[in-house]
Each structure stands twice: as structure tokens, then as C-alpha cells.
Image (cartoon, grey):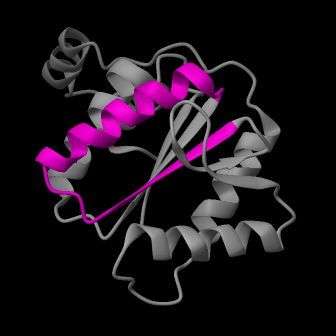
Amino acid sequence: MKWSELPARFVEWVKTNNVSGFDGAIEIIAKSGRTPAAKPKSADRDFVRLIKDVRDWTPGRRRNSEESYEIELRGHLASLNYVMNEEHGQSNVDLIVGQEYAIEIKKHPTLGEYDRPFGQLARHLQHQCKVIALILEAAGQDNFDKFTTLIDRYLDIDKNSVEVIKK
């Protein structure tokens, strides 16, 4: 579950279980626009599989650069028979899987450094159908949460195009 999904899930839990005493919290959530939205369109099975396989990947050790992580992830995905290209196309994607799915890798981003991948993801979405942002060695949970909230609000409009994974 994404942190940004928590308010909607909370509202859903309260309604499903007929829990009382949270009227004030529900009102605040409703005003913030974080109420449950419509369910996403039917999921792209290949994208769902790719997300699972990226989540299942664990780097062998800490690396000094994004490029080293990229090489290791590429090897992992190749062992699972994915077809990939590196830094491909007009948006200069770190990895592109099956000419449809972009993977952008960021290592240890600070608050200001999250602006760059946000812009890159927006550009990737113009050229690829789906995008995975893989954040490695994230410096702080607050910065990561702000980033995922921005992604959810501005880039992942259909709740089916962008997946942010933190390792």
C-alpha cells in the first residue's frame, strides 16, 4: 500500500466495518480530496508482473552509483526473460522493458533531488505507457512520502501508470 492511499483506505475501513467516532477525521479527509476514487482500469498483467519482479529483486550489496544498481537490476530482469534496452528513446530512460515500460532509478535522493525524477517520470509518460520509479537508499521517509504524494496527484492520474518502489 502506498502512504498516499492510507486516507482512502481508512475511510473505506470505517464504512465497511460501521465504525463510529471518526466523523471529524472523515470530514477532514473528504475536504482534502483523499476519499476513495473509482477502482483503476483493468491492470496490465505484464506491468503488474514487472512490478512484482522489481519488488522481489534485492541488490547484492550497496553500490556506489545508480549505474551499478542498473546493471544488477538488468541482470535480474534478463534472468527472468525480460527484453530490455538501456537509456533508450527520446526521454532517455534508465531501462526500458519490452519497449513499453520505463524504469527510472534514483540512488539516495535528497528533497531537492526528487524534483529531477518527477520531471523525468513526466517525460517518460509521454513516450512509454507505464513507468516504475525505483528509489534506492532513500534518505528520509518524509521526502519519499512527499515525492509519492506528488506522483499520485499529478502523474498517476489513472492509478495505473506509475509505480514507485523504495528499496
Residue drawn at the location 53% of the way across and 89% of the way down: 60
In the displayed structure, 14 sits above or below 117; it is above
In the displayed structure, 116 sits above or below 43; it is below
Residue drawn at the location 79% of the way across and 68% of the way down: 78
In the displayed structure, 44 sits above or below 117; it is above
On the image, which quarter does residue 53 sit in?
bottom right
The answer to which of 147 and 66 lies nearer the viewer is 66
On the image, which quarter does residue 8 sit in?
top left
Along the horizontal axis of the image, is 106 left or right of 112?
right
Quadrant of the drawing holding the C terminus: bottom left
The answer to which of 40 and 64 lies nearer the viewer is 64
Instruction: Inspect the magenta stretch and tell me whether residue 114 lies in it.
Output: yes
Is residue 12 visible in the rendered image? The answer is no
Along the horizontal axis of the image, is 49 left or right of 87?
right
**Residue 80 on image: x %, y %:** 83, 68
Is residue 42 visible in the rendered image? The answer is yes
**Residue 69 on image: x %, y %:** 49, 73
User: What's drawn in magenta, residue-wise?
Assistant: 101-129
**Residue 13 on image: x %, y %:** 43, 33
Along the horizontal axis of the image, is 20 left or right of 45?
left
Instruction: Inspect the magenta stretch and tell me whether residue 96 lies in it.
Output: no
> Residue furthest toward the bottom?
61
On the image, which quarter does residue 52 sit in?
bottom right
Q: How many marks?
A: 0
Residue drawn at the location 47% of the way across and 15% of the way down: 37
In the displayed structure, 3 sits above or below 66; it is above
> Residue furthest toward the right?
81
**Residue 105 on image: x %, y %:** 44, 56
Residue drawn at the location 35% of the way across and 19% of the way down: 154
